[in-house]
Amino acid sequence: MSVYSPRLARLIDALRRLPGVGPKSAQRMAFQLLDRERGAARTLAQALTDALEHIGRCPSCRMFCEGGDCRYCTPARTASGHLCVVEGPADLMAIEAGTPYRGRYFVLMGRLSPLDGIGPDELGLDQLQAQLATGDVRELIIATNPTVEGEATAHCLAEIARAQNVAVSRIAHGVPVGGELEYVDGGTLAHALSGRRQV
């Protein structure tokens, strides 16, 4: 038998679905919202309802957008001839905020992971292939994470681009700016050495 009332148990369970939120954190959040932040809780509930009703996915890049107007698929971005493939919306936002890149994107919403049931269909790779076939893309920039799944995804993306005669590049991985070699892990150092370039 649950120690919570049914509605409180449902609220805690809903909060636990957020990434990084365990049972204790979910309980603390629920108690805080109900005890001291009822106004904020109503605002949160309204914002969630609003977002679910009005935010969809761009049919071209698969990023979240409102009303069919995608800020990442403008004619100026298309004219660049660059298409950067990222695993998720947070990766797109990181590139936008931290780099001068202003080309187009394709958001996979994941990475190849057969154990989790994520294959090419779930990532929209047929849609990506169709975009590359139009001839508008001169270079495909692969910006997947340097994990085993990310590398497998990058390999698959490169094969798709080469089949369409599109140039392919991969973002560099290695020593962070301002980092000191003695504190960098072995895997990162190995990546940095294998990806070295002429100066």
Image (tube, rainbow, N blue to C red):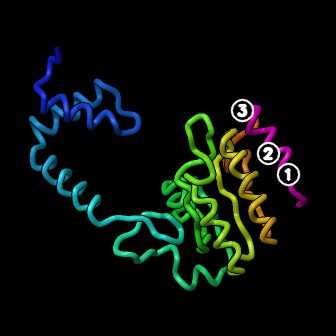
Q: Position of residue 93 (x, y in %)?
A: 50, 60
What SS does tag 2 mark? helix
Total labels: the figure holds 3
Q: Within 10 angstroms of label 1, few (less than 14), some, or many (20 or more) residues?
A: few
Q: Secondary structure at mark 1?
A: loop
Question: Is tag 3's residue or tag 2's residue first in the polypeptide sequence?
Answer: 3
The magenta stretch is 182-199
| Residue type at numbered disc 2 | Ala
Residue where numbered disc 2 is placed: 192
Question: Disc 3 residue type?
Answer: Asp
**Counting other residues with Cα less than 10 Å from the Cα at mark 2, is it few (<14), some (14-19), or many (20 or more)?**
some
Whether the residues at callouts 1 and 3 have beta carbons within 8 Å, the answer is no
Q: Quadrant of the C terminus?
A: bottom right
Q: Amino acid at mark 1?
A: Arg
Secondary structure of residue under mark 3? loop
Q: Circle 1 sits on which residue?
A: 196
Q: Is there CB contact under 8 Å for labels 1 and 2?
A: yes
